Image: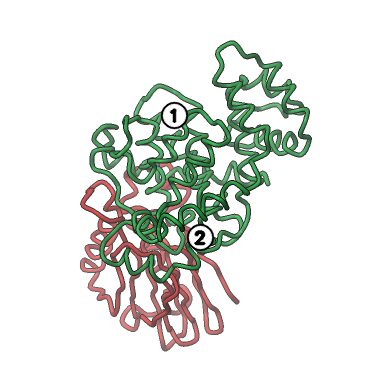
Chain colours: A red, B green
Amino acid sequence: MKQIVQVGDMAVGVKGDEIVTYALGSCLGLMIYDPVAQVGGMLHAMLPLSKINLEKAENNPYMFVDRGVPILFKEVYGLGGKKERLIVKAAGCGSPMGNNEMFKIGERNYTVLKKMLWKNGVLLKAEEVGGSISRTVYFDMSTGRVTIKSGRQERLL
Amino acid sequence: MKQGRKREIITKMKSFPSMSGIAAKVLKVLDDPNSSAGQVEQLLKQDPSLTANLLKLTNSAYFGIPSKIGSVRHAIAMMGWKKVTKLVMAACVNAISDQQILGYDLPPGVLWEHSVAVSVTAEGLMRELKIAESDEIFTAALLHDLGKLVLGGFVEKELNKIEEVAARGIPFQMAEQEVLGTDHAEIGALMLESWSFPPRLVSAVRWHHDPDSAPETSSMTDIVHVSNVLCLMIGIGVGVEGLHYEPSVLATKRLGIKPNQLELIASQTLEWAKELTDVF
C-alpha cells in the first residue's frame, strides 16, 4: 500500500508498502527501518520543540521533532522492529538563502533531532539535510531504500 | 535580447484573461470611503458562480460564524462588507489559480493552497505583532504570486539557464530577471496595475521577494514577504525553486518579529489554511 505522510504527520508500514512525503523544506523527514523484520516508518515534523504551542502538541505531536521522534520509534517497535537493527536516515531541514537566523527553523529541527538520537545512542546511517532545496522522499518498506527527489533530480540516500 | 523577451512576456500578460472583471471593481469600491454595502451587493449579482464560491468561503470554519449564511446581504450584515470584499478576491483567485503552473512545477491546486496559506499566515502575523488590522493584507497575500500564471510558460523554456544563474547563489526571482528580463513579482504587479488595483496592493506584490527595494517600505509588504518564505519552508506551494529566496533581515527588524512568534504562527498555519481550502 502507498501511504502519503502529510506535514506534521507520520506513517509506519510493512513489507510491500511504500511511504512517501512531499515537499520537505525546513521540515525534518526521519526514516527508520528494520531490515530483518522489514518494517519501518517515516515522520514529517515541522518545528523543533513542542513548547512553542503545547495545545497543538497535544492534538498533533507529529508536528514537533521532540514529540514525534519517540512516537515513531515506539510505533516501529510495535510492528516488531528492534532498536539494535534500525537503520535511521534523515532528510530535509533546509533553509532559505542568507543569514536571517529567524528562518533557520530547519537547522533547529536538525539540532533537536541529533540531540535526541545522541541521548538514546542511535546513529544516523545517512542524511541529506540543509541547503535551499525542497525534497520529496520515497521510502520502500520491502528494501528500506530511500529515494530523494529534488526538482528534476533523483538520488538514493 | 532580454528587453525583447520582456516585451514578449508583457504581450502575453496583456492577453491573460482579466480576473473576473468584478474583482477590480469590488476593490475600487473598497478603496472609496463613500461607497456602501449595497454597491458590493449590486456588483456581485452579475456573477452567480463567484457568489456561490463566496458563500462557501463565508461559511468556512476559518471565520467561525455559527449560523449558516445564505446570501450576500446576510454575509455583509454578519461580517461587514470589507471582509466580504476580501472573500470576493479569494473566490476570484481560486477561479484562476486552481490549475497546474508550468515552469514552477506546481500541480493543480497547489498555487491556490499556497495563496491561501500565505494569506492566513499574514493575518496571523498581523494579529501576533499587533499591527493595525487591515483586510488588504489578506488580499495582497492572495495575489502575490499572480505573475507565476503568466511567467510559468517562459520559465519552463528557460529553466536550465535560470537554474544555472540561481546556482551561483542568486535568489530565484533575480535569476528570472537576469534570464527573462523580468520576474514573477514584477509581472504580477503589472497585471494588477493594468486592472487598476490600489497602488499599495500592487507594491506589496511587486516587492514581495525584495521588500527593501520598494520605494516606500510598508508593513503590508514586509508581512507578505515573511509569510511567503514561511509557507515555502513548511512545504506549502514550494515548487521547482525550493527555498531559493532570501528573507530580508531588515523586514523582520522593521516588523519586530521574534523567532518564537514565527514558529507559533507556523504551528497554526496549516489548520487555518485547511479551514479555507476545504470548502471547495
- Which residue is at a point 68% across and 22% down the rendered structure image? B40
Question: Can the viewer see residue A109 in this picture?
Answer: yes
Looking at the image, residue A123 sits to the left or right of residue A47; the answer is left
**Image spot of residue B190 (x, y percent):** 49, 41
Residue displayed at 26% across by 53% down: A104
Total residue callouts:
2
Residue situated in front as seen by the camera: B127 or A89: B127
Residue under numbered circle 2 = A6
Disc 2 residue type (three-letter): Gln
Q: Residue at x 76, y 28 (%)?
A: B70
Q: Residue B171: image x %, image y %?
A: 32, 56
A66 sits to left or right of A14: left
Is B121 above or below relative to B241?
A: above
Badge 2 marks a residue whose secondary structure is: loop
The reply to whether dot 2 and dot 1 touch (C-beta < 8 Å) is no
The secondary structure type at the circle numbered 1 is helix
Q: Position of residue B47 (x, y in %)?
A: 76, 34
Which residue is label 1 attached to? Answer: B200
- Which is in the foreground here, disc 2 or disc 1? 1
Quadrant into which the N terminus of chain B falls: bottom left
